[in-house]
Amino acid sequence: MSGLLALLDDVAGIAKVAAASVDDVAAAAGKAGAKTAGVIIDDAAVTPKYLQGFAPARELPIIWRITRGSLFNKLILLMPVAMLLANFAPWAITPLLMLGGSYLCFEGAEKIFHVLFPHASHAIDEDMSIKDPGHLEEQKIRGAIKTDFILSAEIMTIALAAIEAPNVWMQAATLAVVAIGVTVAVYGSVALIVKMDDVGLFLAENARTGLGRGLGRGLVKFMPVLMKILSVVGTAAMLWVGGSIIIHGLEVLGFGWLGHHIHDWAYAVGHAVPEGWMGFAEWTAKAAMDGVFGLALGLLLIPVATKVIGPVAGKLSGSFASKR
């Protein structure tokens, strides 16, 4: 009997350790996931554009396929690479973060540049030339998954840099939880957003009360406004996150001049307002300065990306396709 009690005591001890590990993974995943907020907002803002022009019945199946592609990107392609880097080449994480931050700055600046100086979109022209809906759907899904791969790489790298785990297994578990949680949050939100106008239309036509029908009409009218708000917030988040990543990376590499000055300026702003608003004002000032730096860097990167990197990548991908 004493042996059985000892065994049960050991099992209870193991259960406590396992429960503590689960709590540690959840806490670490929450902390790491919070660091990726800017990229998540942009991902949620970007994805609905891939659903434009499709019948409502095809929206959720398309989102589901993109979600599966996103999980494949994060868990099968990116997570093993991230773990190898963290354990065998940790010095490479900061440069990779800065590369991803530069991409975010470029994307955010390019969106603002396109609004200020509209120009023709080759992607739209290609879509208009495709007559087969099935082929167009496949092309849109591939494009969305390709875009997701870039954003997922940034999410996984940011999360990896924020994870403080005692061993490789805890690190892997935390990264997996972040990957799944972020994907569910992004594409669950996208599903709600793209179907909300359908819900509004249904209420407007079928609700039994005037209040319900009015709510439905309000939803239909509000959805375009919401999409514009998401676009603006997503662009601002990209510039803020991208700029802050570059500035922090420069500090890690020993070039902390700009980061120190931004910290001092933000500190001065925070202490120029009433005490109750001090923290908020300091954070807002720092985020704004990070965003302005991100915008400036992104504008500088536009000609580099469009005139040098884009054509070179196109030639390389064309050469690869011709050899296959």
Image (tube, rainbow, N blue to C red):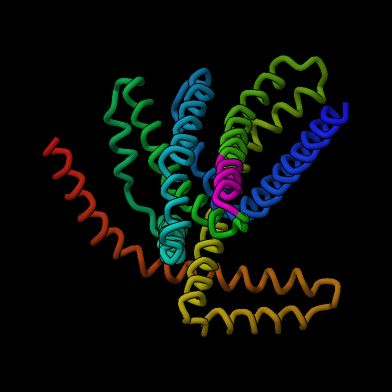
Q: Residue at x 47, y 50 (%)?
A: 83
Of 56 and 145, the residue lying toward us: 145
Tell me where residue 116 appears, x and y as whole percent: 44, 60
Q: Residue furthest front?
A: 2
Q: Residue at x 68, y 32 (%)?
A: 219
| Quadrant that contains the N terminus | top right
Q: Is residue 232 visible?
A: no
In this picture, is 206 found above or below 312?
above
Q: Residue at x 66, y 73 (%)?
A: 285
In this picture, is 53 found above or below 107?
above
Is 154 situated left or right of 187 in this image?
A: left
Of 90 and 124, the residue lying toward us: 90
Of 112 and 209, the residue lying toward us: 112
Is 261 situated left or right of 49 in this image?
A: right
Q: Main secondary structure of the magenta part?
A: helix
Q: Is residue 146 visible?
A: yes
Which span is picked out in magenta?
167-179
Of 142 and 167, the residue lying toward us: 167
Tell me where residue 233 appears, x and y as whole percent: 59, 53
The tally of labels here is 0
In this picture, is 95 found above or below 172?
below
